[in-house]
Amino acid sequence: MRKYRYDNVNIYKTMAFPTSLFVDNNGKLPYRVRPRFNSEYVWNFAALQAIGADKVDYHTIEMWFSKP
């Protein structure tokens, strides 16, 4: 689904997306999983900051394989 940017018009014709999303999504669908709390958040937070994973909407940033 992410690979096709959740294209429910041409690819997933019968799929309906939820109307209400988690508030941190800012109206966007997720593209990745956030790191677990007891991982880099505890042991290597600087590495998360370097890639922007400390932002609340990190999980809605599109992955490299689905960008044009």
Image: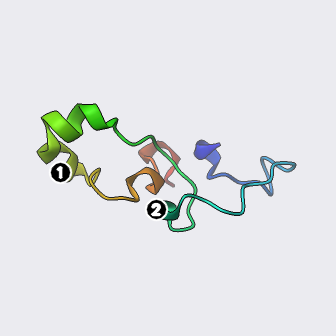
Q: Name the residue under label 2.
A: 24
Establish if 51 lies above or below 40: below
Above or below, comparing residue 8 to residue 28 in the picture: above
Mark drawn on residue 11: none
Q: Callout 2 environment at 10 Å: few (<14), some (14 to 19), or many (20+)?
A: few
Instruction: Name the residue carrying label 1.
Output: 50
Quarter of the image holding residue 61? bottom left
Name the quadrant of the N terminus: top right
Measure the C-alpha gap from mark 1 to mark 2. Answer: 20 Å
Residue 42 horizontal/vertical position (percent): 17, 37
Residue 22 appears left or right of 7: left
Residue at the spot 19% in from the left edge and 52% down from the top edge: 49
* Front position in the image: 47 or 65: 47
Is residue 46 or residue 23 the one in the foreground? Answer: 23
Q: Which residue is drawn at 55% across and 58% down?
A: 22
- In the rendered image, residue 3, in percent from the top left (x then y), is placed at 59, 43
Q: What residue type is labelled 2?
A: Asp
Identified at 80% across, 57% down, the residue is 9
Looking at the image, the residue that sits furthest to the bottom is 26
Where is residue 41 drawn, in percent x and y? 22, 41
Choose mark 1 or mark 2, whichever is in front: 2
Indicate the amino acid at tag 1.
Ala
Q: Is residue 37 left or right of residue 45?
A: right
> Which secondary structure, mark 1?
helix
Identify which residue, 2 or 66, lies in the foreground: 2
Under circle 2, the secondary element is helix
- Mark with earlier residue (1, 2): 2
Marker count (numbered): 2
Q: Residue at x 61, y 52 (%)?
A: 5
Q: In the rendered image, which quarter is residue 58 located in?
A: bottom left
The colour scheme is rainbow
